Image (cartoon, rainbow, N blue to C red):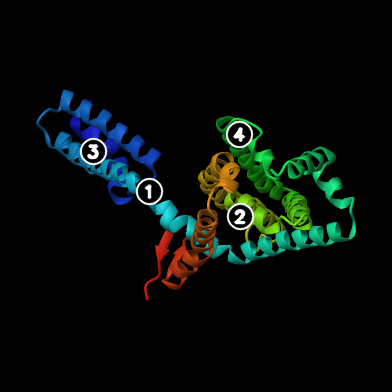
Amino acid sequence: MRESLFIKKNVDRWKKYQEEPTEDPDEMAERFTSLLDDLAYAKTFYSGNSSARYINSMAAVIYRRIYSSTRGERGRIGRFFTLELPLLFAKYQRVFLFTFCYFLLFCIIAAFSAAHDETFVRGVLGDEYVNTTESNIANNDPFGVYKSENEWVMWMRIGYNNIRVSMLCFIGGIFFSAGTLWLLTSNGIMLGAFQYYFFAKGLGIQSILTIWIHGTLEISSIVIAGTAGLVMGNSLLFPGTHKRVDSLKKAARDGVKIIVALIPIFIAAAFLESFITRRAQEMPVWLCVSILAMSLVFMIWYFVLYPLQLKRAGYFLNENGKPEKANV
């Protein structure tokens, strides 16, 4: 093939590469590979001519962009946790507030029901758990259930269960939020009955200093997972000007980000429950209060205060879900 014909055949594609650069990594890689093929052909048949130098310059530009993108990936995780995730909570703060109030409402309803019906706690928590706990109370070890198995086995089991519950809370949103609301209702009732039971036994403060060492992270994360589920459910119920399928895709993307970010928190909660909670009664009160307070401050700051701070500073998520700062 003559060089002029080779150039005529490919010049439109080369111009597109120059005039319409892409940020898509797959498309960038495909273009780079295509140019390498062209360069190899040009060097074989037109070595030293201008076409080979021209193609080489284009390939070099794409190579530099690929390399710079690869280096940028190192800061991507940090950017996700410092900007993208907090901005999601700024975006869905009303849904988060509703989820928290809904969950708290059923905790209160359960506690009120347990106070007026002696059989309510057994109906919710089960006879086996209540009988075991009463036996532990009689043996002056009311929270002995947390010592019932090996720490490492307990950590893996509880971590898996917490992540499973959060996934169910999220996936339940696909049923127009009904599945998520049901799981929030059932978990809220269980927590309310559980906490009232210990207060009724005169162990309220002790239960807070013991159970909420891990419960602060665990329960807060379940509520946040419920938020992710309601975000997805609301996208189906209230798609706005978008098609339901497009609204669902966008909400599902946001929800997955929230659930993935909760995984390390659930693992940390499971660690506290498996290794620390079982020793809470032997620990000084100030240490129990410190762990509980640090967990609470972290959850409030990271999921409530910090997102609002970013929002006031002018940060927002664009249509692609990427953080940007408004020009003020």
Q: CA distance from mark 4 to mark 2?
A: 20 Å
Element carrying mark 2: helix
Residue 154: image tag: 4
Which amino acid lies under the numbered mark 3 shown in the image of this protein? Ala
Across and down, in percent, residue 246 comes to 61, 52
Q: Looking at the image, is mark 3 or mark 2 earlier in the sequence?
A: 3
Which dot, 4 or 1, sits closer to the camera? 4
Using the image as rendered, state which of residue 132 and residue 18 is in the foreground: 132
Q: Which residue is mark 1?
A: 76
Q: Looking at the image, is mark 1 or mark 3 earlier in the sequence?
A: 3
Task: Tell me, yes or no, if residue 65 can be seen here.
Answer: yes
Q: Looking at the image, is mark 4 or mark 1 earlier in the sequence?
A: 1
Across and down, in percent, residue 183 comes to 74, 49
Element carrying mark 1: helix
Residue 95 vertical position relative to residue 262 in the rendered view, above or below: below
Q: CA distance from mark 1 to mark 3?
A: 25 Å
Q: Which residue is mark 2?
A: 209
Q: Which residue is mark 3?
A: 59
Which dot, 1 or 2, sits closer to the camera? 2
